[in-house]
Amino acid sequence: MRSRIPDRRRGLISLADLVPLLVAIAVIVAAFTAAMAGEGSAKDQSPATLPASPAAEQSAVPAASSPVTSLPNARQTRIEQARTGQTEQAGTDQTDAAKGEDAAAVQRGYHNLRQRAYLPPDFDADTFSQLWTLWPEPARTLASESDEVTRHRLIRQQYGLPPDPEHPEATGPGLAYVPRGDGSFAMNCMACHSNVVAGKIIPGAPNSLFALQSLVEDTRLLKLTRGRRLSHLDLAALKLPLGTTNGTTNAVIFGVILEAVRDQHMKFDPSRPIPPLLHHDMDAPPLWNVKRKSSLYCDGFAPKNHRMLMQFILVKQNSAEQVRKWEPEFRDLLAWIESLEPPRYPFPVDEDLAATGAEVFQAHCSRCHGSYGEGGSYRQQTIPLEVVGTDPVRLNSLSQPHREWVSGSWMSRYGQDAVDTDPGGYIAPPLNGLWATAPYLHNGSVPTLWHLLHPDQRPVVWERPAGDAGRVEDYDPARVGPKVVEHDNLPERTLIPREQRRFFDTRRRGKSAAGHTFPAELTEPEKQAVLEYLKTL
């Protein structure tokens, strides 16, 4: 039986429809945005901190008819290094002063992430606190009979919002939002890049519980029933899919739209055409592995610089001048991201079996994913699509003209930072903290590590049961990932939309669990040993 969720087809969306919604699209932070209370303004930055003007910066780059074919030899080399993993290793010696400045940048980055608002609000405190009134039974009655602290915890769990690790029992939407000072809340990058896994609140972890579509639909409905003004995000969800399965979002396409209406200097230009939009769901990557990578995103096409983190604040309200003034803050945000360490596995490990698994991993897996422990190393490389065999939709969703725009724009320092406009595959990522990053593959289609190691037993449809809140009892240490229910088809009964999003249907476009069949060459004892070893990374 096929999914009843409508298939999203590729097609053009008119500029007239999209321009009024750019603010809302930007609020959906899929990857690396910062937001929080306080309106950023020009007076927040001193002239001494401002970067060079676009003209001055661009003048340092040789003129080019094509951002790719005319790259300087050094840039061509960096692109090839990024694809083969043969990147230069930076020195590790630092002066005390340099270490002190690094630590200060990390602190500033986290502070800005939690306190600065670069985007508009999504809802106010009263709207958030009343969302439970829209829930089906028995969840609604449970919330109505709970005290305020418990009710707010239930609301966060309903939409996959992690609590603030410093104040886990506080009311409000938690780590992914902060109050702006006027009673409203703004989203930051923690919405997609923090999670509760096996009872642990983990900043930087991919949020596999985030029910963005349901949250926005409920927020919009509540505002309509109470005669309140809709936000841009409420309106955007009427035009664009936000995510068809909990834990995944359409973030890549949000970035495409925002960049499409900017010229190479970041000036807002609504006359620019919107490209065809290939909507698809993506699983957010863990932030703690950014420091081990030489470029960004699952295809590795983008340079690892702080400007690429700014793509989701390219809303109409933020002028090119304002975006450049915020650049130092995003430089600090990248410093915070690169300071993150992977979380340790919280359950017992069979050390003898893990030691055997380390040997199997070294022999069969390390050539792509690197080695770990003392003397370990990782060199990023792109695995061609025809080799890895995973779902191609994400790779095809970024056109070559879009990638070339990035290569010739302020985002890449006008080509000084290498952009791979034809990656041809997906990178083999580092595996640190792998236990906390389920589900697996770039689209989140494989629920556990056990399923990843058993390609022929991956479920067609799998479900995270209602009430899954990332607790210890929701985690499966034997298979390493969430406890799931496997299905051959979607249930026969009619599902309301919020129920549909608990099911991951691998038959839908962009959601295939095919590919990465390399573990099939291992024996069953070898697979079990590797599984045990992967818990330790």
Image: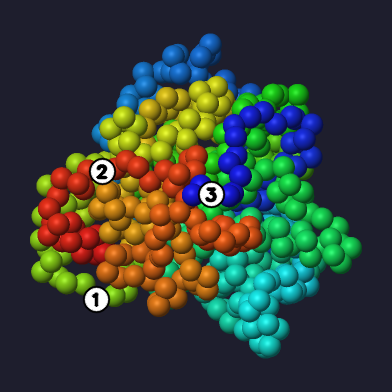
Most foreground residue, 473 or 334: 473
Depth check, front residue: 468 or 64:
468
Q: Which residue is mark 2?
A: 517
- Mark 3 Cα shell of 10 Å, populated few (<14), some (14-19), many (≥20): some
Q: Please, what is the three-letter code of the amino acid marked with disc 3?
A: Ser
Distance in Å between CA atoms under marks 2 and 3: 25 Å
Looking at the image, residue 494 sits to the left or right of residue 518; the answer is right
Q: Is residue 487 visible?
A: yes
Which residue shows up at 78% across the image and 72% down it? Answer: 126
**In this view, 386 is above or below 185:** above
Mark-to-mark CA distance, 1 and 2: 28 Å
Residue labelled with disc 1: 348
- Judged from the image, the secondary structure of the residue bearing numbered disc 3 is loop
- Sequence-first disc among 2 and 3: 3
Task: From the top left corner, tell me how far across and down residue 330 is, in percent.
Answer: 56, 48
* Labelled pair 1, 3 in contact (Cβ < 8 Å): no
Location of mark 3 (residue): 3
> In the picture shown, does residue 101 fall above or below 442?
below
Residue 472 location in percent, x, y?
A: 40, 77
The residue located at (27%, 49%) in the rendering is 456
Where in the figure is residue 435, as x and y percent of width and height? 33, 62
Front-most of 355 and 116?
355
Q: Position of residue 165 (x, y in %)?
A: 52, 74
236 lies above or below 389: below
Say what secondary structure mark 2 lies in.
loop
* Alpha carbon separation for disc pair 1 and 3: 39 Å
- Say if 315 sits above or below 445 in the image: above
Asked which quadrant contains residue 309, the reply is top right
